[in-house]
Image (spheres, rainbow, N blue to C red):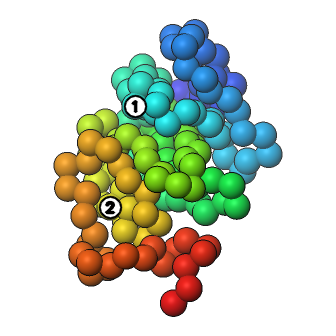
Amino acid sequence: MSSPIEQQDYLTQLKTALPQAEVEAVEGAADPTILVKPEQLLEVGKYLRDQAGLDYLSMVTSLDRPEYFEVVYYLYSYGAGGGPLVLKVRLPRENPEAPSMTSLWSGADWQEREVYDLMGITFTGHPNLKPFLLPEDANFHPLRKDYVP
């Protein structure tokens, strides 16, 4: 089994293969973490899956930061082992929207729906983006810091 590729290796690969992509390392993170712009998320994700061998998406989650929301993706390679590589995208608090990763990893389906339901982040291109934890007519997102029950 080959050794896992380090964060800097992924950054170097991405900057070489996709010179237009604005990617950067997130310093001080517990796992290797790369920040990408929302409009480049699918292109970077496709490269990481098809060329870098990150063929497994284990988790999609989100964070409510004071100035923005973050959507966080945990990617692994079955072949290389080790991991994860964490991919992050930052979204504005007003109308947060990111492209759906379901076309690359089908495992993103329910997890993006959960983030949509609980945080109110829209995933464009998602095949079935509707609530499954809250009522369909709910007009609140209980994991947002500004939510008051």
Residue 132 locus on image (x, y percent): 26, 73
Is residue 13 left or right of 55 when viewed as pictured? right
Q: Nearer the viewer, residue 49 or 124?
A: 124
Q: For the view shown, which residue lies furthest in the right direction?
A: 28
User: Does residue 126 show up?
Assistant: yes
First in sequence, mark 1 or 2: give its number: 1
Question: From what the image shows, is residue 96 above or below residue 56?
Answer: below
- Distance between mark 1 and mark 2 Cα atoms: 17 Å
Residue 117 locus on image (x, y percent): 37, 68
Q: At label 2, which amino acid type do we have? A: Arg
Residue on which the image places disc 2 = 113
User: Does residue 84 show up?
Assistant: no
Residue 61 locus on image (x, y percent): 49, 58
Residue at the location (49% across, 36% down)?
A: 38
Is residue 97 left or right of 93 when viewed as pictured? left
Residue at the location (62% across, 35% down)?
A: 34
Question: From what the image shows, is residue 64 above or below residue 99?
Answer: below
Q: Residues within 10 Å of mark 1 (few under 14, many from 20)?
A: some
Question: From what the image shows, is residue 128 above or below residue 76?
Answer: below
Residue 107 locus on image (x, y percent): 31, 51
Instruction: Name the image quarter holding residue 146.
Output: bottom right
Q: At label 1, which amino acid type do we have? A: Leu
Q: Identify the element where label 2 is drawn.
A: helix
Q: Which mark is residue 42?
A: 1
Residue at the location (28% across, 54% down)?
A: 109
Q: For the view shown, which residue lies furthest in the bottom direction?
A: 149
Q: For the view shown, which residue lies furthest in the front direction?
A: 94
